[in-house]
Image (cartoon, helix red, strand yellow):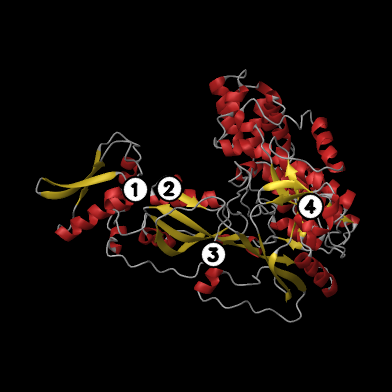
């Protein structure tokens, strides 16, 4: 096996100088129009654009490093679904793979071109549970339960009643109760209204009153604010498991967004949901979710009003789900408009199946703007808080939403947190949270101000720096020693890392080798790469022997990560197609709705590579795809590919 340096990939077709000049003029016009009108980044299933996606999908992963349970969604500053030309122009300032240490390949085949995630539906992720079962949405039925309220429960309240009850439940007005008149007064009708209020608005109690000869159902808070959105213990049958588990099928939406939407519709707090890992936005993903004391009936009812996702495969269990409990994820990926010969494709896929790919941290780990997240992480570890503040808030070139640009400009001009905050309609972004912290604690207490940002989001920055070091060191390791085990390498015995001795080296292959993410509780290789770690950290004004931070949260214990990952269940086929808008396989939802397989021509204008494989947690599918194509998977490069393909 040999290692190969990364080659540049030619784009889709050559253009004349006139084409380039005309395109540049169009680009300037479109950027000007965009700056005047703004752009709408919203997209739902019914209005999917026929243009290629302009951002590279976050891979599904579930980190095993402490504190890294959540996806890095906060580090993506925006979803840029605007004009492809202007977005490509802005992405000139983005990162490339070599900027974050991703430079090597393990296979010797010749690379070829293809478009990754031209449509979000070209990337499908199925979660693999801890029992090895792959999650599928294949059943909309609701478990039969005599305790469930009737279907009328969901329709008996008017929209006006629901609005008033929600305001009462959330304490949005001064009212202490809401009266609902019983129009057709029967005991059965009153019972349905009681059930509807209590099941749809947790925390509210009801009673019946006579007023002027008419019957009213009075809703009120049972125990003040403490009762808000708490599942009602006494209304849940003892024989039923406390958690409703279900499969969430979602399109073009990340996991946390989906849970926030479900919470809003159900009028409960998001923290009653649990899951094993967060999944990508720009994909179709299928995963298991558990929710505390919400009936399958209520959840199934949401399928009538949700556009971007569906719920099914309901069951009741006595336990929630825990982050990291999954075995991994199964991917179905379509690479469109491929240029490789059948021979090249066979070589590439055989290599992926037999050898695998370098287990780099993917590009989404490092953010999408001109200020990489690892730089902020490095400043935190250096205890350079003015630099942390500056990196997060300063103006930056590249793709960002207009209000963030104005906020940064205001900050650069005035250094006034209040003035900069006024430019932000969305205060929940990292910039808004830091500005609120500066407003509260003052410019001389940046540490406390930064602490307002949620802990996992803060830790993402230092984990990004660890990943940056790891990527660079692995590239050096492969360049220095190739794809074989050598004395001084590290391997795991159980959970403990040990050095490989000279006499044992023949007992190990490259698939056994791990390398450390820097920290105070890891050991380093006993060869040149061990010294390279120290040199890299010294260059960053950090001491590899003192990775404890004076703020405990930012002390890095470190972890070990395999150098090479060999995917499981690898399969592939090349398909021909004429229309870039048609899907090239059926999804779980297509099958449930009885949609037939797409009819594809035997000799179409274009060719696509459809590939399937399974990966363990904490690995990046884009890095596997990179090994197949031998091409840069950064947004910067993919945007250039996609926008060239549009012309």
Q: Which of marks 4 and 2 is nearer the N terminus?
A: 2
Q: Give how far apart the Cα atoms at labels 2 and 3 are.
A: 21 Å
Q: On the image, numbered disc 3 is attached to which residue?
A: 135
Q: Helix, strand or loop at disc 4?
A: helix
Q: In this view, does 644 lie to the left or right of 367?
A: right
Q: On the image, numbered disc 4 is attached to which residue?
A: 637
Answer few, some or many: residues within 10 Å of disc 1's Cα (few below 14, many 20 plus, some between 14 and 19).
Answer: many
Locate residue 526: give its quadrant.
Answer: top right
Q: Which residue is drawn at 78% across and 68% down?
A: 349
**Viewer-closest of 355 and 296:** 355
Q: In the image, which disc is placed on residue 272?
A: 2
Q: Give how far apart the Cα atoms at labels 1 and 4 are.
A: 48 Å
Tell us which disc is closer to us: 4 or 3: 3
Q: Helix, strand or loop at disc 2?
A: helix
Q: Which of marks 2 and 1 is nearer the N terminus?
A: 1
Q: Give how far apart the Cα atoms at labels 2 and 1 are.
A: 9 Å
Badges 1 and 4: C-beta atoms under 8 Å apart? no
Where in the figure is residue 15, as x and y percent of width and height?
87, 59
Q: Helix, strand or loop at disc 3?
A: loop
Where in the figure is residue 588, as x and y percent of width and height?
54, 69
Q: On the image, numbered disc 1 is attached to which residue?
A: 231
């Amino acid at each position: 096996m040999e290692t190969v340096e990364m080659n540049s990939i030619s784009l889709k077709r050559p253009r004349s100088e006139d084409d380039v000049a005309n395109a540049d003029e169009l680009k300037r016009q479109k950027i000007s129009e965009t700056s005047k009108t703004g752009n709408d980044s919203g997209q739902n299933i019914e209005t999917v654009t026929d243009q290629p996606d302009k951002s590279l999908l976050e891979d599904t992963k579930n980190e095993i490093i402490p504190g890294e349970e959540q996806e890095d969604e906060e580090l993506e500053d925006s979803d840029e679904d605007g004009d492809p030309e202007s977005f490509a122009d802005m992405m000139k300032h983005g990162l490339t793979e070599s900027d974050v240490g991703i430079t090597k390949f393990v296979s010797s085949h010749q690379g070829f071109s293809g478009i990754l995630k031209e449509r979000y539906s070209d990337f499908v992720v199925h979660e693999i549970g801890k029992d090895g079962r792959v999650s599928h949405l294949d059943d909309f039925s609701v478990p039969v339960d005599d305790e469930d309220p009737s279907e009328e429960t969901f329709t008996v309240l008017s929209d006006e009643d629901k609005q008033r009850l929600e305001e009462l439940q959330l304490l949005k007005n001064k009212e202490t109760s809401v009266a609902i008149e019983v129009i057709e007064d029967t005991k059965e009708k009153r019972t349905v209204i009681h059930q509807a209020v209590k099941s749809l608005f947790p925390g509210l109690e009801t009673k019946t009153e006579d007023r002027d000869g008419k019957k009213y159902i009075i809703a009120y808070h049972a125990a003040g604010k403490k009762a808000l959105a708490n599942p009602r213990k006494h209304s849940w049958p003892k024989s039923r498991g406390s958690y409703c588990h279900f499969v969430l099928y979602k399109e073009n939406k990340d996991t946390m967004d989906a849970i926030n939407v479900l919470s809003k519709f159900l009028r409960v707090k998001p923290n009653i949901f649990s899951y094993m890992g967060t999944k990508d936005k720009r994909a179709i993903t299928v995963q298991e979710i558990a929710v505390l004391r919400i009936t399958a009936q209520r959840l199934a009812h949401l399928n009538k009003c949700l556009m971007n996702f569906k719920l099914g495969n309901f069951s009741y269990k006595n336990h929630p789900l825990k982050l990291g409990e999954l075995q991994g994820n199964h991917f179905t990926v379509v690479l469109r408009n491929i240029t490789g010969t059948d021979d090249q494709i066979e070589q590439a896929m055989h290599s992926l199946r037999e050898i695998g790919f370098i287990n780099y941290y993917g590009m989404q780990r490092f953010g999408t703007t001109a200020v990489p997240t690892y730089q902020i992480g490095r400043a935190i570890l250096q205890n350079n808080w003015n630099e942390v503040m500056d990196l997060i808030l300063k103006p930056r070139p590249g793709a960002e939403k207009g209000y963030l640009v104005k906020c940064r400009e205001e900050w650069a001009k005035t250094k006034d947190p209040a003035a900069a905050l006024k430019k932000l309609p969305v205060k929940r972004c990292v910039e808004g949270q830091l500005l609120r912290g500066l407003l509260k604690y003052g410019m001389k207490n940046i540490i406390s101000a930064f602490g307002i940002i949620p802990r996992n989001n803060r830790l993402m920055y230092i984990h990004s720096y660890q990943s940056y070091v790891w990527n660079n060191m692995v590239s050096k390791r492969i360049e220095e020693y190739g794809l074989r085990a050598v004395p001084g390498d590290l391997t795991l015995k159980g959970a403990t890392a040990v050095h490989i001795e000279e006499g044992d080296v023949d007992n190990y292959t490259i698939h056994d080798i791990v390398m450390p993410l820097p920290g105070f509780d890891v050991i380093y290789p006993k060869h040149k790469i061990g010294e390279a770690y120290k040199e890299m950290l010294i260059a960053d004004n950090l001491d590899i022997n003192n990775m404890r931070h004076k703020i405990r949260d930012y002390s890095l214990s470190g972890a070990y990560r395999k150098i090479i990952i060999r995917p499981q269940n690898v399969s592939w086929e090349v398909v021909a197609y004429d229309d870039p808008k048609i899907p090239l396989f059926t999804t779980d939802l297509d099958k449930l709705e009885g949609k037939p397989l797409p009819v594809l021509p035997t000799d179409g204008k274009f060719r696509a590579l459809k590939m399937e494989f399974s990966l363990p947690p904490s690995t990046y599918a884009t890095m596997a795809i990179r090994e197949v194509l031998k091409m840069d998977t950064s947004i910067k490069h993919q945007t250039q590919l996609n926008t060239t393909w549009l012309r």
